[in-house]
Image (cartoon, rainbow, N blue to C red):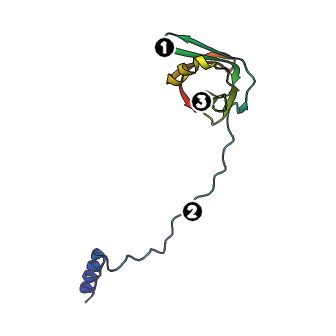
Amino acid sequence: MSLINKILTYCMYVCGVKKPEESPVSAPKREAVPEKPLKGTNGPLLADLLVMRRDDRIVLVVDHDFEDIPEWVEWDVSRNTIGIAQMGGAVAELKSTIPPEKAELFRSAKNIALAVRFEGKNIVHGVYMVVRD
């Protein structure tokens, strides 16, 4: 009789008449991990900015010693700021001094060369350029 009950129960599961019972073992709970503080230069940055163009490459020079490696550059047209996002999550913001006649040059750029100081050394990074309108 037990074998017949198992077969009939299996048929009911397959047909969708009977739902499988929840197991009494619950999923293990994960502990909340506190957020790590941002690493790098974060917030408004008072530094000189120089923009150069050579052939199809754009070079952006920022006179600042960064604490973390820059990952990408973001130009927010509406706020008139240039943000430099770093690998640790921090974003340094510069007031944009890009003249209107050079705006199309930045809009079409995908990658730029970013020259900064990192750990006291002058370094040029090839980074992505993101334009937000």
Place of residue 3 in the rendered image (x, y in percent of width and height, measured from the top left): 25, 84
Q: Amino acid at mark 3?
A: Glu
Q: Amino acid at mark 2?
A: Lys
Residue 54 position (above or below residue 37):
above
Left or right: residue 11 versus residue 25 is left
Q: Circle 1 sits in a helix, a strand or a loop, which is it?
A: loop
Which of the two labelled residues, at mark 1 and mark 3, occupies the earlier sequence position? Answer: 1
Identify the residue position indicated by label 2 in the image.
29
Which of the two labelled residues, at mark 2 and mark 3, occupies the earlier sequence position? Answer: 2
Closer to the camera in the image, 53 or 128: 53
Q: Amino acid at mark 1?
A: Asp
Closer to the camera in the image, 105 or 31: 105
Closer to the camera in the image, 27 or 47: 47
Place of residue 14 in the rendered image (x, y in percent of width and height, measured from the top left): 28, 74
Q: Residue at x 69, y 29 (%)?
A: 93
User: Tag 3: Cα neighbours inside 10 Å, few (<14), some, or many (≥20)?
Assistant: some
Identify the residue position indicated by label 1 in the image.
56
Left or right: residue 60 versus residue 24 is right
Q: CA distance from mark 2 to mark 3?
A: 38 Å
Q: Tell whether label 2 touches label 1 (CB within 8 Å).
A: no
Place of residue 15 in the rendered image (x, y in percent of width and height, measured from the top left): 27, 76
Identify the residue position indicated by label 3 in the image.
74
Could you say which quadrant of the image residue 37 lies in?
A: top right
Residue 83 position (above or below residue 118):
below
Closer to the camera in the image, 51 or 97: 97
Query: Mark 1, mark 2: which one is toward the viewer?
Result: 1
Q: Residue at x 51, y 69 (%)?
A: 26
